[in-house]
Amino acid sequence: MYCEVVPESLPSLPPDVGLTWRALTVDDVPAWFHLKKTIEDHDDAVERTAEHELTTLFTGSWRDPERDFIGGFDEHGRMRAWARTEFRPADEGTPAPILLGGVHPADRGRGIGRALLAWSEARARQQLVAAGSTGPARLRVFVDEHQATTRSLVERAGYSALRWYVEMRRDLSQPLPKVGVDDVRIELYDRARDEDVRLTHNESFAVDHWGSNPLSSEEWTLSVVDAESFRADWSFVAVDPPSDRVVGYLISGRYEQDWEPQGYTEGWTDLLAVRREYRGRGIAEALLTAAMHAYADAGLEYAGLDVDTENPTGALGLYERLGYVRERSTVMYAKELA
């Protein structure tokens, strides 16, 4: 059992690479952002990071930055490497910490990435035990499909590719369909419906979205509707009129940091779900087309989203029928813990 061999202390990070290692604080965000941008530009990352997104990582009751975040600094105080673990304990589903990190391109090939991965794995095991997890668990690492060197590093550490997530885009200069649904209203997102939408999310994702765990009210607020990227005016809910109940929803975001590297502006669909008993009635299509029209009205060039290629709801086929085309992919690597 992994819980019987949890490390009391974390592995030492290499002292012979000219870096000083310490926990990250919110004061490190500017330096962290500069390093991440350097790495993402060099690696042609599928997704780019905004500085405010890093600041947000220091909030949330489930996070402990002093123990979960680490950075390596050179003699001039410049951050050259980083790692963190992200774990939200949940009452349902398989516990699955995410391991993240990066090394400045000029400092690669010196064993730093390998050491950071080992550190992160040990910290994730500590998190699992601290949360009282005793059953099967899964460690996750997400790698852009085209990053062969990083994929090799992760594979050598005992991780196996488990899921593929493909980004898709839809040219908004092409004719946009208008889809209506009988007996269901499509409305702009209203913050008064936050809790109803959260419950719809948890119910819908728990049934058919692999690896999904419920979101608490705190997590929903912090990570979704209070996020700086969230656009209520591009987001929609599907409402059953007799009960005034939310039966589906679409959450949109504006990620301007991606626009210049990818060469076009884009409205991004972060989340989309329909309650199971309301599926097959065109609600998802209606929500997606409402969002497309909102993006186009805002002067954006494309609609974008990503999807698990093995999603059992048939989402991939739906998106393709609406004119979305496949772009680049991200691979989820996993190490199963018994």
Image: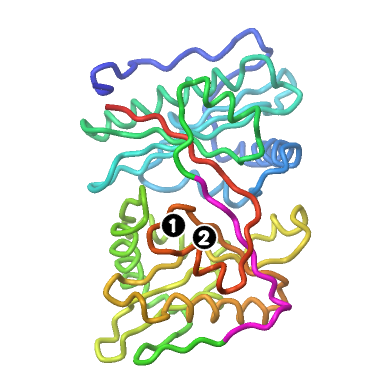
Secondary structure category for the residue under label 2: loop
Colour pattern: rainbow
Residue beneath the point at 73% across and 78% down: 173
Viewer-nearest residue: 150 or 17 = 150
Question: Is residue 176 within the magenta segment?
Answer: yes
Quarter where residue 281 is shown:
bottom left
Up the image or down, 1 lies above or below 166; here it is above
Left or right of residue 163: residue 243:
left
The tag on residue 222 is: 1
The image position of residue 39, as x and y in percent, is 70, 36
Which amino acid lies under the numbered mark 1 shown in the image of this protein? Leu
Residue beneath the point at 30% across and 34% down: 137
Q: Which residue range is magenta in the image? A: 164-177
Residue beneath the point at 42% across and 56% down: 311
The tag on residue 16 is: none
Residue beneath the point at 72% across and 38% down: 43
Which amino acid lies under the numbered mark 2 shown in the image of this protein? Ala
Up the image or down, 117 lies above or below 52; here it is above
Up the image or down, 109 lies above or below 278; here it is above
The image position of residue 162, as x and y in percent, is 44, 39
